Amino acid sequence: MLPIDPQADRARRAWLACPGCDDARDCGVCADRRNCPTHWRYLLRNEGPRVHLQCPGCTHLWTVDTRARG
Ligand SMILES: [Zn+2]
Ligand SMILES: [Zn+2]
């Protein structure tokens, strides 16, 4: 497990599926694309359309290019 990034801030969150643990797979709240109180990710920083995220559950770090999302 990676350490939680020092820039992680609970006030800055994103609701995206984690590619590391897929913990929201069976969650009805997430399936409805509502802001689930359980399944959220730290929004660490963004560089233009590229957003850096970390999952508080499994500590997986990844980047999403928001231009690539419908
Ligand atoms: Zn995860
Ligand atoms: Zn959820």
Image (cartoon, rainbow, N blue to C red):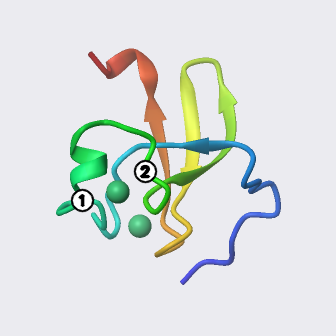
Depth check: give the residue in front, 43 or 25: 25
Location of residue 25 with respect to 32 vertically, above or below = below
Residue density around tag 1, few if under 14, some if 14–19, many if 20 or more, within 10 Å: few
Name the residue located 46 percent from the left edge and 63 percent from the top edge. Answer: 38
Q: For this view, does 21 lie left or right of residue 52? A: left
In the picture, the disc for residue 27 is: 1
Query: What residue occupies the far bottom of the structure in this picture?
Result: 1
Depth check: give the residue in front, 66 or 34: 34
Residue density around tag 2, few if under 14, some if 14–19, many if 20 or more, within 10 Å: some
**Residue type of the residue flagged with mark 2:** Cys
Write down which quadrant ligand 1 falls in. Answer: bottom left
Q: For this view, does 19 lie left or right of residue 60? A: left
Depth check: give the residue in front, 12 or 4: 12
Report which quarter residue 22 is drawn in. bottom left
Depth check: give the residue in front, 34 or 64: 34
Rendered location of residue 23, percent (x, y):
30, 67
Query: What residue occupies the far left of the structure in this picture?
Result: 26
Is the CB–ligand 2 distance for label 2 below 8 Å?
Answer: yes
In three-dimensional space, the C-alpha distance between marks 1 and 2, rounded to whole angstroms, equals 9 Å
**Residue type of the residue flagged with mark 1:** Cys
Report which quarter residue 12 is drawn in. top right
Rendered location of residue 62, percent (x, y):
48, 51
Q: In which quarter of the image is the N terminus?
A: bottom right
Is the CB–ligand 2 distance for label 1 below 8 Å?
Answer: yes
Name the residue located 26 percent from the left edge and 15 percent from the top edge. Answer: 70
Rendered location of residue 59, percent (x, y):
54, 71
SS label for mark 2: loop
Among numbered discs 1 and 2, the one appearing first in the sequence? 1
In the picture of the structure, the residue carrying the numbered disc 2 is 36
SS label for mark 1: loop
In the picture, the disc for residue 54 is: none
